Image (spheres, rainbow, N blue to C red):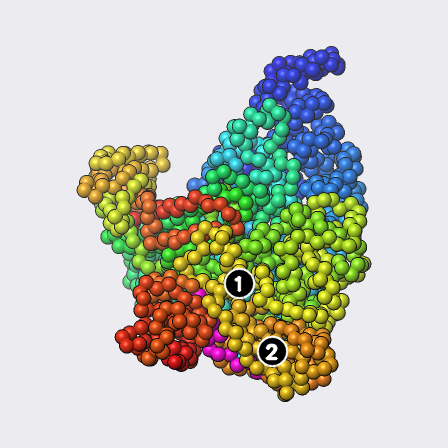
Amino acid sequence: MLSMSTNNLSYNDQGGSDSAVEVGQETTPTSSNAGAGFGLFSTNFKKNDDLKEMLESNKDSLKLDAMKRIIALIAKGKNASELFPAVVKNVASKNIELKKLVYVYLVRYAEEQQDLALLSISTFQRALKDPNQLIRASALRVLSSIRVPIIVPIMMLAIKEAASDMSPYVRKTSAHAIQKLYSLDPDQKEHLIEVIDKLLKDKSTLVAGSVVMAFEEVCPDRIDLIHKNYRKLCNLLVDVEEWGQVVIITMLTRYARTQFTSPWKEDGLFDENSETAFYESDEKKTKNGDEKKSYMMDPDHRLLLRNTKPLLQSRNTAVVVSVAQLYWHLAPKHEVGVITKSLVRLLRSHREVQYVVLQNIATMSIQRKGMFEPYMKSFYVRSTDATHIKSLKLEILTSLANEANISTILREFQTYVKSQDKQFAAGTIQAIGRCATNISEVTDTCLQGLVLLLSNRDETVVAESVVVIKKLLQTQPTQHSDIIKHMAKLFDNIAVPMARASILWLMGEYCERVPQIAPDVLRKMAKSFTSEEDIVKLQTVNLAAKLYLTNSKQTKLLTQYILNLGKYDQNYDIRDRTRFIRQLIVPNEKSGALGKYARRILLAPKPAPVLESTYKDRDRYQLGTLSHTINTKASGYLELSDWPAVAPDQSVRNVEVIEPVKEWAPSLGKTGKSKLSKSSDDKFYSDSGEEKEKGSGSSSSEDSSSEESSSEAESDEEKSSSQSSEESDKSSSQSEKSSSESDSEQKKTTKKPPQKKTVKPTAKDSDSDENGNVAKETSSSSAEETSSGSESGSDADSHSGTERKKKTKSKAKPKMEVKSTKEVSLLKEVSLLDLDDFTPTPVTRPKMSVLSPSLLGDLEGLSLSNISSTIQVSGPAFVPEKSHDLLHRMTGKGLSAQYQFPRQPCLYQPTMVSVQISLTNTTDHPLEQIHIGDRDPTGLDMHCFNAIECLLPEASVTVSLGVDFNDSTQAANFQLCTKEDQFSVSIQPAVGELFLPATMTEQDFRKEQGKLLGMNESSATITMAAENTTRQPISRQVATVANLGVVPSGQDNIHRFAGKTASSGALVLVTVELRELSAALITINTEKSVMGPMLLRDLKRALARA
Amino acid sequence: MINSLFLINPSGEIFLEKHWKSVVSRSVCDYFLEAKEKALEPEDVPPVIHTPHHYLISIYRDKLFFLSVIQTEVPPLFVIEFLHRVAEMIQDYFGECSETVVKDHMVMVYELLEEMLDNGFPLATESNVLKEMIRPPTILRSVVNTLTGTSNVGDTLPTGQPSTIPWRRAGVRYTNNEAYFDVVEEIDAILDQSGTTVFAEIQGVVEACVKLSGMPDLTLSFMNPRLLDDVSFHPCVRYKLWESERVLSFIPPDGNFTLMTYHVNAQNLVAIPVYVKQSISFFECGSDGRLDVTVGPKQTMGKTVEGVMVTVHLPKTILSINLTATQGSYTYDNGTKLLVWDIGKLNPQKLPNLRGSLSLQAGAPKPEENPSLNIDLNIQQLAISGLKVNRLDMFGEKYKPFKGVKYITKAGKFQVRT
């Protein structure tokens, strides 16, 4: 280093000797590693000169060192702007690290060196076209960070382009760039809103948070942009990165306040207009029925509440508080309670987090004591807490105090009063005062306690007590003249001005109650008047005046003396007051009429002060905001509007294309179930990055108008819609059915090797990293629907793999499906049993939903130890082949239908039981349009099969149905329709078909059985048929009757079987205990008290059968 | 959102600044420094300060102030949480978070900050993602870099970034696949003079160190998940599965992370592992006082209580102390009046005791309140709530990992009032 600096000096002297530079270069790399030693350079001048040299050299390592030192200068806040020309030359460097540092430098100084900064722009423009998404993104990042007004058009162009980039990462960057451009040139607002609108439609979780942020900064009032994306945002929320969640939740809170009616009104004015009816028809959420009589919560409102709730468990405190505020501002009053626990949990976090959370709790606890009362002890103060934390906790404890807990709280306060932190002790005394006024039962106790504190050794404590006592006495002075006397006695010992002033005021106000003492106090004050503080002097004057009016005989002279002292006081306030009082009370010719009222003026009854929390009116600000914390409106604060009296049109949130593509990602780690997706392993969580490995085959269809590509996109879309609709518990029957079936078709194919497409890849400049669908997205801007479809395709592709059989495509008739949900695709044969894979549906009890036996087999091979001791749903032990008549060919005019229970977990919804229907055409002409028509309106939730376009004579087809029997044997009634006819049919399930088998260990079985005694147990003793006395026949018989799993048993004479009910997942435990003489005791334990006896009856029959 | 960040040391020197939007003059920190002067302790500085044109949100951590400058409305916790992430990131990269470390790695910290925020909005805060973009320094790498001229900056986009599991980097390979979980429980308690529990609760955290190749999908189940009253998870945990089956199912990030934190149901009575007999008294006349503290094991479930330490903030009026400890040693700082008695392992046969006299400053009144004792302790191989990990299953990968679970109980905010 040292040698280098001398070299450079010599270089300067000679004005450009190459040799010197050479030496410099040789020495640096050895001596300076990571720029640790730049402390050697003492002056700025030297350093900068030398840096310039290094930057102009042609060795990257030297340049890098120079840049590192420059960045270190910037980090320290030193000015390095004069190096700009030297640095900007390196912007096109090949060395990534060097380039990055140059970028950092540029962003920092471009604003100051606008002309020179323009030199770098072309580099970025080139980089924006780079095949590497990282480079495109960082170029856009830097370009948009250069705050030079002249390049606004270039930035605008770049943002627009990036917004339709194939990489979600680049799109995210463009969302950030929008905000930067807006702050640079607000005139671009209109154009930027267009881009925001486009990005809001994006389905990537990566983009969502950033674009909402841009929305909030650029056009927070354009609520209309949100409508169409509302449901998508709600559904994506759980998978958005945590920072985005905060922004989205805050925005949605505001949105909801403008769009929904208040859930708080007891007597809602919500009238059942046509819109609600419309909603009810296709969304069943309202049936949850937790709403009051006439108020019907908008399903979208409910959606928001439901989808944000899991986020209360986030590790990010900001997310938790934002959900808490959402519940506070949006949820019905009785539901707000769910946030309490999470907020209390945050109190374990860092001091700063505690501070903000406590503030929010303080505001909440004023309105809703009950919410936090059970957690009162969490607000107990520790001696190690910071001062502002202590006072907030006090505040909350005070708010929580009520008749029941006041004694506990006061006991706790007693400890605090003795605290070494006197500021805090004083705060506690105020808190006691507040409790005393709020709860009349303890006013006396508190007052006594406070009086005791008057003899405390600490001044602040005494002073605070006096002040609080004063306030308390004001509310009920009559009984307490002895306290006033006591205070008068203490007067000499109290030095704190505020306290002295308070006592004087009390004396004056209640001088008639202490006629002996007051004049004496005045006498003392007269003596010490000149040495008192101003506030005490003022009160002395007041006292004098009041005494003069009530007891002029004793105090006339004293008063005059004090008034005279006051007249010449240094403080003009006191001189003023003295003059005023003198005119008022001492009668003279000039005083006029006012004198007559002196008594009424001075001794007017005064209202008692209200002791209330400083957090009383904080709720005018949205909780969790900066404005709430500082209790003033921060710049950029967006008011939370009041609920509208009548909800605006709800249909604006409807999205035309089937169901909005809410969740493209089953990958939703949190919602899903992916761990069972062994066979599709990493595709599950995959992303475009992974696609490249296997997606080359499909990276075809550049041509967006081609039938194939659009159908592909479509089927993806269907899939995602089916997922989303399944999750949201509503079955918009037809579309869902068709979609999930075509979906299953796709699934079947995923294992097969990539299929070459006929369309040859014409990819413009789509690099190998990207798959064709993504590339397509950029190019297709024509047909609105198609493009949106392909966008979803690009994302949805990630989990199913990009390859798909052509068969699927040829079957699907995508255009029809897009336009109407009634249209159906032609599917010759759909058999759910063939599925190798499953749709990772977000389900409530996912394990049981998706595990097919073959999959389970796979799992066993892969896992460490598959059989966990917890109760797991397993494959059926036995599938009876018995099928039942659904429609006889005579009644069905040639169409015959039979149904059987395949005992597979239902794919559509875990709560459904799957039913297989075989349809046979016994006529001699083809039957067209076989589908399910009207269902029993009161009936059960069903998932129908796709309509069958055509069934040829003598042909038969098997379709699958999902029925949620609600754990009852009630029959499912519906209409089976052909083109011409309708037939009423019904499926009557045996009780045993309503179960899903479960595996568990013997211990678990016993444990669970122990929980299901008494009413939940039904048992019977039977005589077994002779052949049924060994393990195998018993197992078979039981399995025939009911879809139960065998539990390994240690004893030979006891056989155990376990299952769960499909709909509610309640455990069903069956024990068959063999006794002597072929007698057997059958015991059934289940909380389903109806199903138990029914199953028992069936089992009895089966086992006793000869 | 976040406009600028300043790192300030306890003496008020600004040693690093970073701006994500236009530059804010560092003079804005004067408001903060003023507030800092006013506060007695660094912890007492208000986290949110309102200045005429800006809002200052700061955290105090590891003896450093992280001060961010905000210009418009933003949830304060958003900023606070982010600042803590910055501190954690520095800790993660360099082993500790201190002024020296930041000054030594100024450029790297600056680059990291550049990556973490874009235009004031968090861009990459996952350690797995950051480490792919900017590799943490190791001795070996710095040697290699010097010799070969390669850099610490990754040149590819972190694969985790655009995926749906941003917390895990792709292509992880280990020769030894291992997954360790530490169940750490802390007892928060307040005991009063007589030893009665005023308030006690157990907070736990499951720290994980997972070094597994590929994309493992783990399932961790507990023997008694019902104990857990309130939980919060790393984003990788599938919430729905927890809701329905009380198992933790997740694809873990690579390396160290906090899997979950939990709170144990308050209804369960909390076992307090130690008892403290204390008497601190000051004589009314004369400037003298006595201190006598004995610590003994109480409900320890047969385990040894280790690392016991008693910390006392003595009243300001104490002049000097003269104590003897039967076990361990004590230190006393006359400046801060902080008495620390480091006991070590608790021996039930011979209870440690600390006694002696305290002398007050001449003429000073007898202190009103006795100082409270803060207790520190740890118990190895015990989760005081009784929580037990049942099993860990791995799906998605074929190898057999080495698994381990460790339990430890510590004292959290454990305070004895006297």
Q: Which stretch did the figure color magenta?
A: A986-998
The answer to whether any part of residue A1043 appears in the image is: yes
Quick check: A431 above or below B205?
Answer: below
Residue A744 image-quadrant placement: bottom right
> In this orientation, which residue lies closer to the viewer: B165 or A115?
B165
Q: Residue at the spot x=72%, y=74% of the render?
A: A949
Towards the viewer: A683 or B286: A683
- What kind of element bears circle 2? loop
For the point 49% across and 53% down, the residue is A861
Q: Give the CA separation, mark 1 to mark 2.
A: 46 Å
Q: Which residue is mark 2?
A: A270
Residue extending furthest toward the bottom: A891
Residue A952 drawn at (x, y percent)? 71, 76
Amino acid, disc 2: Phe
| Rendered residue at 47%/69% (across/down) | A878
Give left or right: position of A1027 versus A993.
left
Amino acid type, label 1 = Ser
Task: Output the chain of dot 2.
Answer: A
Which residue is denoted by mark 1 in the rendering? Answer: A852
The structure residue drawn at horizontal position 31% and vertical position 45%, both measured from the top left corner, is: B379
Q: Is residue A426 left or right of residue B86?
A: left
Mark 1 falls within which chain? A
A81 versus A227 height, above or below = above
Badge nearest the viewer, 1 or 2? 1
